[in-house]
Image (cartoon, rainbow, N blue to C red):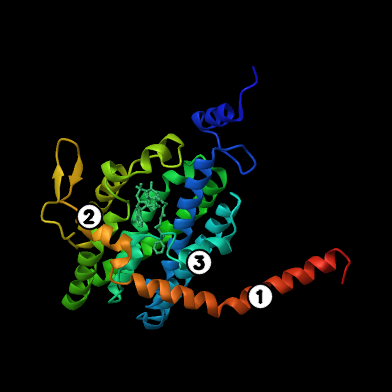
Amino acid sequence: MTPTPEQDFDALVESDQRVEPRDWMPEGYRKTLVRQIAQHAHSEIIGMQPEGNWIGRAPSLRRKAILLAKVQDEAGHGLYLYSAAETLGVDRSELLDLLHAGKQRYSSIFNYPTLTWADMGAIGWLVDGAAIVNQVPICRCSYGPYARAMVRICKEESFHQRQGFEILHTLSHGTPAQHEMAQDAVNRWWWPSLMMFGPPDDQSPNSAQSMAWRIKRFSNDELRQKFVDMTVPQSQVLGLTPPDPDLHLDEETGHWRFGEIDWSEFFAVLKGDGPCNQDRIEHRRRAHDEGAWVRDAASAYAEKHRARSEGVA
Ligand code: FAQ
């Protein structure tokens, strides 16, 4: 008997092959991917703001050039991800409208302020570090365009993580005031970075289905633990201490056990009550409005080329 489209889809996912845009897919699978990829794309472009805040105040030309390149990479990641979402039959302008209307999310982490230069180090080391742990498994996600976009993104995130580590290493081994500034940044970014992985598994409504579809490969708590295990030894090299009195090595399992996460803070940020939620969205809307002429010019240029290649003009 010929298999149904649904049986073909299940077999494809089961055998770890890739689902491609023209393949049949369940509507729930498509919707989940649009939700996650759009949220991911929005995070990249909103994530440009906290670091953009320091481009004009970087302490040297070298630091400024590196930070500029990093923020440009984030814009590029947004572009790959919006393109990946478009293969699922949505248009990026629709997704941006949903973001601006507060109907789609972006990562909670970008609702915290960047108060000192050391925050550039903490974002690179912790936020990009968490992004890598979360995203490397997505390189094996069942949806081809998302998985392929993620390969290049992860390579760039590794560079970002190294540059953050280097900023913090320099500050930590500098004057006592610089060391204190680095420690203060780690104190403020540590817990929000752990929250990036999402709610605990028993409060994560999407995980079971996303794992069955192989969009997610590991649960939120598994990835959070991997991140802590990777990061604590790095903090020792940096000479900086995560702000968690309960952090300790569990000799039996080899895992670093950490204290209670304040989930009320996470859910407040998701509801829009984080320190910078309003600023981030207002700034994004303004940038979008002010960029209208660029989009118009690009469309007019593309139209002119299309007409020329068709011999109309
Ligand atoms: N923030 O059922 P789950 C970067 C929402 S890295 C806000 O567990 P799911 C690089 C979730 O959407 C950051 N909302 O959800 C960079 C859901 O609500 P919904 C971006 C969150 O999807 C570095 C609800 O909670 N990375 O940008 C968060 O299975 C430096 C229930 O949660 C990605 O997006 C959160 N942290 O798992 C850029 C990675 N966590 O949608 C600049 C791809 C959960 O039903 C500078 N995404 N929620 O209304 C994922 O892996 C997943 O979507 C999770 C959430 C793990 C984030």
Q: Which marked residue is nearer to the observer: mark 1 or mark 3?
A: 1
The residue that mark 3 highlights is: 75
The disc label shown at residue 296, or none: 1
Q: Amino acid at mark 2?
A: Trp
Label 1 CB less than 8 angstroms from ligand 1 = no
| Number of on-image labels | 3
The disc label shown at residue 286, or none: none
Q: Is residue 44 above or below residue 34?
A: below
Quarter of the figure that contains the C terminus: bottom right
Quarter of the figure that contains the N terminus: top right
Answer with mark 2 or mark 3, whichever residue precedes in sequence. 3
Q: Examine the rendering and report whether any part of residue 203 can be seen.
A: yes
Q: Amino acid at mark 1?
A: Asp
Does residue 123 appear left or right of residue 156 in this picture?
left
Answer with mark 1 or mark 3, whichever residue precedes in sequence. 3
Q: Residue at x 40, y 61 (%)?
A: 106
State the residue in front, 169 or 203. Answer: 203
Q: Position of residue 30 (x, y in %)?
A: 53, 44
Q: Position of residue 262 (x, y in %)?
A: 19, 56
Q: Amino acid at mark 3?
A: Ala
Give the structural element (helix, strand or loop) at label 3: helix
Q: Position of residue 162 (x, y in %)?
A: 37, 61
Measured in 3D between alpha carbons, the distance from the residue under mark 1 to the one under mark 3, in whole angstroms, is 19 Å
The residue that mark 2 highlights is: 263
Disc 2 crowd rating (10 Å Cα; few below 14, some 14-19, many 20+) is: few
